[in-house]
Amino acid sequence: MGVTAICGINWGDEGKGRMVDYFAENADFVIRFQGGNNAGHTVCNNFGKFALHLLPSGIFNKKAMNIIGNGAVVNPEALIGEIRETEKVIGKIDNLMISERAHAVFPFHILLDEYEEERLGANKFGSTKKGIAPVYSDKYMKTGILAGDLLNKDYLSKRIKNNLELKNQIIEKIYLKPKVDVDEMIEWGYKYGCELKEYITDPIPVLREAVKNDKKILLEGQLGALRDIDFGIYPYTTSSSPIPGYASAGSSIPPYEIKRIVGVMKSYSTCVGEGPFVTEIFSEKADSIRTKGKEFGASTGRPRRIGWFDAVSSRYGCLISGATEIAITLLDVLSGEDELKICVKYRIGDSSTEKFPTTEKLYASKPEYISMPGWKEDITGIRNFYDLPKAAQNYIIKIEELIKVKIRYISVGPNREQLIKV
Ligand code: GDP
Ligand code: MG
């Protein structure tokens, strides 16, 4: 089977957690390769319902080793909280590794995230305020603190002092807020480092062996392609790269080993936070889909913005992800809609395009829709494509035709078994 990457095709919240949980039943390794606890991956399985933020979605399979890769960023306090909460249900977690090279998120990263959103005011990004942009900024400024650094108090002290020398100037003089206490941060980092000691390690040797022995490895992306720092709707992106192209760098798996790329997309569109969203709908229709789909952020509880399926952005998401197959989710939510719209082109001024443009042009883009008939039936119990109402089959076939990638899985409910394999 080799290595499979499972990544979001749109703006995130496509149901990746749900799909990773499904694939993880037979996996040997599950690796989160980027992002932090700004993710909310919902998993509903035999153990119950979980919103995972940092733990890879394979944590419920005791036989699978779950790895938080070097490309991810870890808030140690938040991770310990998540481990303890999850352990209450599944027992002691001993199938977890945290790469010693993953960056640690400190309370001052969170403060900086908050202060910056406050400074931006009306121009804010809609940050989840988990310190993600500040910690990735530190990574590239080379002032960051690695998970492995938390275990060596002397070295940790040097790194924190070096980092806060500049940060405290910014906090005091630009944001006009009180300085961060250096010693407190050293104690904080060391305390949580010690608590996570059993998990912080170098996963590279284990992964090399795993690849050599053709173990089943899943790479779990967070968010979606349209939030990618390079290819997404910059600057309304995340601060890392959730596409499979980065999965190698963020995990140490050689790129040529990634043979299968499952793109996860929703059967309609949702988007959390700010930024252009061409197919957005506002009416009661949006409220009805939001309620049926329980479209409130798994991490933040924020109501998600709702839109019709966007074939222009989804095709682009597939393209830059290199998706070899698609899992389409939440089809059941569309039951009961009389009419379903699909955006097939964007109109910018006098011309139409099938190409997904940069943010500046996205603001000027208007959706060109085709209309498809809806269906009334409850489809949550269906497990065979040909048992779906004809209108639902046609909707899927039309989407497949437009995105030009084979749809292999159709999810008709949040539970592990509510899946149609095509
Ligand atoms: P992720 O961030 O991509 O893992 O997705 P989230 O967990 O943030 O959001 C997906 C939401 O949809 C969660 O509440 C899931 O339980 C739910 N979900 C996933 N697949 C389906 C589905 O096919 N039908 C329904 N009704 N809900 C689903
Ligand atoms: Mg989510």
Image: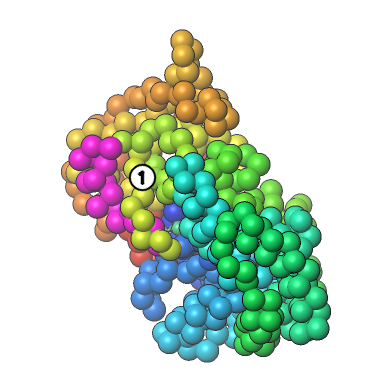
Q: Amino acid at mark 1?
A: Arg
* Res 282 seen here: yes
Tell me if residue 188 is in the magenta stretch. no
Q: Quadrant of ligand 1?
A: bottom left
- Work out which residue is located at the far top of the displayed protein and give it: 350
Dividing the image into 4 quarters, which one contains the N terminus? bottom right
Residue pictured at 44% horizontal, 53% vertical: 13
**Looking at the picture, how far across and down is residue 26, in whole percent?**
55, 70
**Image position, residue 187 (x, y; %):** 66, 84
Q: Any magenta on residue 283?
A: yes
Residue under label 1, please give it.
Answer: 305
Vertically, is 209 above or below 266? below
Along the line of sight, which residue is nearer the eye, 392 or 302?
A: 302
Q: Residue at x 41, y 23 (%)?
A: 366
> Residue 194, relative to residue 316: is it above or below?
below
Which corner quadrant of the image does residue 301 belong to?
Answer: bottom left
Rendering coords of residue 232 (x, y %): 58, 40
**What's drawn in magenta, residue-wise?**
282-298
- Who is closer to the viewer here, 166 or 149? 166
- Can residue 136 be seen in this snapshot? no
